[in-house]
Image: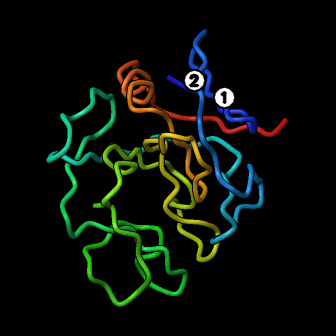
Amino acid sequence: MRAIVTQDGILTLGTQHFRAALGRGGVRIDKREGDGATPAGLLPLRKLLYRPDRLPAPLCSVPLQAIAPDDGWCDDPQHPAYNQPVRLPIAATAESLWRDDAIYDIIGVLGWNDSPVRPGLGSAIFLHLARPDFAPTEGCIALSEPDLRQILATGLTEILVTIG
């Protein structure tokens, strides 16, 4: 099932509409590492990660995997593991998936710059939990936990991010 996200932060799934936080850099066709933008285009939901010590596994139609304290995601364009999951620590810049806040308690890995990976075109584009105030993300799409669980349970497989 496909959801559509517009640059004004509305995710539509069928006839339902949900508030979404998007990247602080807006929505861009020419996504680059560090620009804070959410990439425009069709983003397949590759798999779902979750933090098992904090919440039960969400219902979903894609592969599901529990994360651990040493799980990370490489965001270093010069490293061979760029835009891929890694074990921490690593001799490169990488984002920890095991966070003190709750935004990565559920992480949908979105298919951006992953087939093939091209250095510098953006990494770690996720569907995850929004902060309580729906503050902008670093380029991801974020929803409230009830909304994210609801759309995952419908069989979500891809998100079309649009401009205009």
Q: In the rendered image, which quarter contains the C terminus?
A: top right
List the single residue furthest toward the top.
15
**Is 126 placed left or right of 24 in the picture?**
left
Q: Amino acid at mark 1?
A: Ile
Q: Position of residue 134 (x, y in %)?
A: 57, 41
Mark 1 to mark 2 CA distance (whole Å): 6 Å
Residue, x 14% and y 47% (percent of image)? 53
Image spot of residue 106 (x, y percent): 34, 43
Residue found 55% across the figure and 26% down from its top: 2
Tell whether label 2 touches label 1 (CB within 8 Å).
Answer: yes
Give the residue at x 19% y 49%. Answer: 66
- Up the image or down, 11 lies above or below 44; here it is above
- Which mark sits nearer the N-terminus, 1 or 2? 1
Q: Nearer the viewer, residue 22 or 122?
A: 22
The quarter holding residue 8 reads top right
Dot 2 amino acid type:
Phe
Q: Nearer the viewer, residue 56 or 86?
A: 56
Q: Residue furthest front?
A: 133
Is 94 drawn above or below residue 17 in the view shown? below
For the point 52% across and 55% down, the residue is 125
Above or below, comparing residue 82 to residue 6 in the picture: below
Tell me the number on the disc at residue 57. Answer: none
| Residue behind mark 1 | 10
Residue furthest to the right in view is 164
Secondary structure beneath disc 1? strand
Q: Position of residue 46 (x, y in %)?
A: 41, 45
Left or right of 120 on screen, residue 127: left
Residue that badge 2 annotates? 18
